[in-house]
Amino acid sequence: MNNIILLGAPGVGKGTYGEKIAKILNLKIVVMGNIVREEAKKKTAFGKKIKETIEKGYLLTDEDITNILKNYLNNSKLKEGIILDGYPRTINQAEILESLIKVNKVVYYFASEKIIVQRLSSRLICPKCKAVYNVLTMPPKKAGYCDNDNEKLIRRKDDEPESIKKRLKEYEEKTAPLEKFYEDKGILIKIKGEGDPEKVIQKTIEKLKT
Ligand SMILES: [Zn+2]
């Protein structure tokens, strides 16, 4: 098993890189945000609680998010290892994760705040197939519509300017210390998440192989 974690502020490009890196390395991409959104669709009391928290733009508690991940890992057949995007977000979560899987490498993507804000406010998703576009870097073929199914693209609620500011602030406070946590373990790789995404991906693969 080869398990890789992707770290980096919202909008640094993790989603784009992770999906392609997973394909190249034959690993399963596990995007915490997607798993959480699936949970939030469930008509259970827990699902409803998760839905409310997301809509307010807050991060979930460590306990809630960990339970969602545990259930996912238990119900999935993962043989080749995973690329985990969106978890852990706190030191506490990182410590819990150690008891769930062995973490082999952690890729920390960084970019300037200006670039992050620019990217986030230009991100569009397809409500039907969940494809992600970016009007600056990865525009759909037909402006405003999904390449896969021609559905009208929308901006996610947490990509609105107020939510972006809140998320960046929460990231700084809670997630940035993870960089040090994994650096101390000697498994951290730092990569600049700016410029051509293909080059960022290529660099990541090279570093993961060394
Ligand atoms: Zn679509």
Image (cartoon, rainbow, N blue to C red):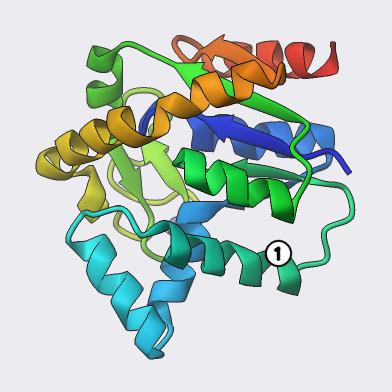
Along the viewing direction, whichever of 93 and 27 lies nearer the viewer: 93
Along the viewing direction, whichever of 96 and 134 lies nearer the viewer: 96
For the point 56% across and 25% down, the residue is: 181
User: In this picture, is 122 found above or below 185?
Assistant: below
**Image coordinates for residue 50, horizontal then vertical, percent:** 34, 71
Q: Which residue is outermost to the left?
A: 162
For the point 70% across and 31% down, the residue is: 21
In the image, 141: left or right of 124? right
In the image, 202: left or right of 177? right
For the point 29% across and 31% down, the residue is: 173
**Quarter of the image where one finds residue 188:** top right
User: In this picture, is 78 found above or below 108?
Assistant: below
**Quarter of the image where one finds residue 18:** top right
Q: Is residue 201 at all visible to an observer of this figure? A: no
The answer to whether mark 1 is within 8 Å of ligand 1 is no
Say what secondary structure mark 1 lies in: helix
The residue carrying pointer 1 sits among few (fewer than 14), some (14 to 19) or many (20 or more) residues within 10 Å by Cα, namely some
Q: Is residue 133 at all visible to an observer of this figure? A: yes
User: In this picture, is 48 found above or below 207?
Assistant: below
Work out which quarter of the rendered image holds the C terminus and state it: top right
**Image coordinates for residue 76, horizontal then vertical, percent:** 76, 68
Work out which quarter of the rendered image holds the N terminus and state it: top right
The residue wearing badge 1 is: 73
In the image, 144: left or right of 196? left
Q: Which residue is outermost to the bottom?
A: 44
**Image coordinates for residue 78, horizontal then vertical, percent:** 82, 58
